[in-house]
Image: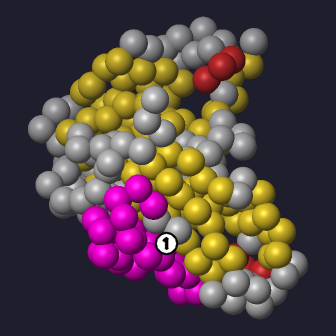
Amino acid sequence: DAEITQSPRHKITETGRQVTLACHQTWNHNNMFWYRQDLGHGLRLIHYSYGVQDTNKGEVSDGYSVSRSNTEDLPLTLESAASSQTSVYFCASRRDTGELFFGEGSRLTVL
Amino acid sequence: DQQVKQNSPSLSVQEGRISILNCDYTNSMFDYFLWYKKYPAEGPTFLISISSIKDKNEDGRFTVFLNKSAKHLSLHIVPSQPGDSAVYFCAAGLSNSGYALNFGKGTSLLVTP
């Protein structure tokens, strides 16, 4: 069965460290997205990609980067983790009919 | 500025009754609207969608209504069941582009027995 998986599911790191959250989908979807979910803010878009070598900034992209070297993967990197980046991160890919399919989330704590 | 707004953070409904969740949007270019359901410690799951060419879409117990002139949509759940207790997110976007969906802040629905 096709799916979208995120790893790690939980991570604790220290301020200033580099962190990478992995996202892998097996649907061969071109469009992939990273969102963060915070209390009182809902889901906010961090970065998105329409295909290999394409990346774009979302509304809360500062401090984050992504790369798209193949269709299946869109890793999210926090260059220098900050306490404000403590959050739950969701990766998603988009069907041709428009719906996003989400992974189960990665809970990141920055101490 | 938030383009999709869910002004009710929470809603409590008795089992068997109707649940009505509301959503407003500000961007008149949006032509595709979706509702997602989220349980704790899980990713959001797609529930139902509606295109701007329609004003109603029904799927079992779930119906979404769209009022384009008011830039308002609502999700009706009839009858409500305890398993419907979750956070519901409204989302809007453009159907002819690959652009990401804009989400509201969510409404936490509690269905009590």
> What's the amino acid at mark 1?
Ile
State whether residue A37 appears in this view: no
How far from the left and from the top, in percent, is residue A23? 53, 58
Q: Nearer the viewer, residue A87 or B2?
A: A87
The structure residue drawn at horizontal position 58% and vertical position 86%, both measured from the top left corner, is A63
How far from the left and from the top, in percent, is residue B98? 24, 59
Answer with left or right where residue A82 lies relative to residue B98.
Answer: right
Answer with left or right where residue A57 lies relative to residue B51.
Answer: right
Q: Residues within 10 Å of mark 1 (few under 14, many from 20)?
A: many
The colour scheme is secondary structure
State whether residue A75 appears in this view: yes
How far from the left and from the top, in percent, is residue B88? 55, 39
Of the 4 image quadrants, the one containing the C terminus of chain A is bottom right
Q: Which residue is mark 1?
A: A46
Q: Tell me if residue A45 is in the magenta stretch.
A: yes
Q: Nearer the viewer, residue B110 or A59?
A: A59
Start and end of the magenta stretch?
A44-73
The structure residue drawn at horizontal position 39% and vertical position 12%, both measured from the top left corner, is B60
Answer with left or right where residue A84 lies relative to residue A1.
Answer: right
